[in-house]
Image (spheres, grey):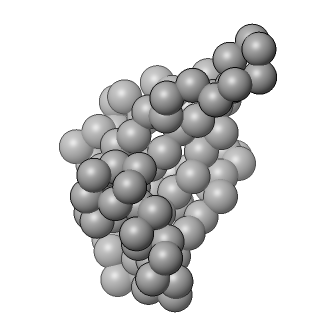
Amino acid sequence: MYELELYTHPLCSDCKESKAYLDEQNVLYTEYDVSKAAEKEDDLKKQTGSKVVPGFVFTKKSLLGKMKRPLVFTGFERNASEIKSLLQKM
């Protein structure tokens, strides 16, 4: 089962669309507003290689409890099909 971290900014329309979709689908996620915490913007860059929001970070533990490499996406609109597919596995 995947866990989702979502990096957002309040002025980002794609972020708003992402959150609306996730809420509509009753998806549990942890949101980080990069405008409120500079360290979260740094975390976003480490995870995705970019400061582009929204940043989706899907994490999953292996059967032995170790973290597998996260699946990351920047932008909802251009990655919607892959993101929606992963959400079905949550």
**In the current view of this chain or complex, which residue is farthest to the bottom?**
36
Count of numbered marks? 0
Q: Position of residue 72 (x, y in %)?
A: 39, 40
Is residue 39 toward the left or the right of residue 80 in the image? right
Q: List x then y, in percent, for residue 80.
A: 34, 38
Report whether 65 appears left or right of 17. right
Return the x and y of residue 13 as percentages of the image width and height.
32, 71
Residue at x 65%, y 39% (from the top left corner): 3
In-front residue for pair 89/69? 69
The quarter holding residue 60 reads: top right
Point 57% across, 52% down: residue: 5
The percent coordinates of residue 63 (x first, y second) are 75, 12
Q: Is residue 23 visible?
A: yes
Q: Quadrant of the N terminus?
A: top right
Q: Nearer the viewer, residue 35 or 79?
A: 35
Residue 25 visible here: no
Above or below 68: residue 10: below
Quarter holding the C terminus? Answer: top right
In the rendered image, which quarter is residue 73 located in? top left
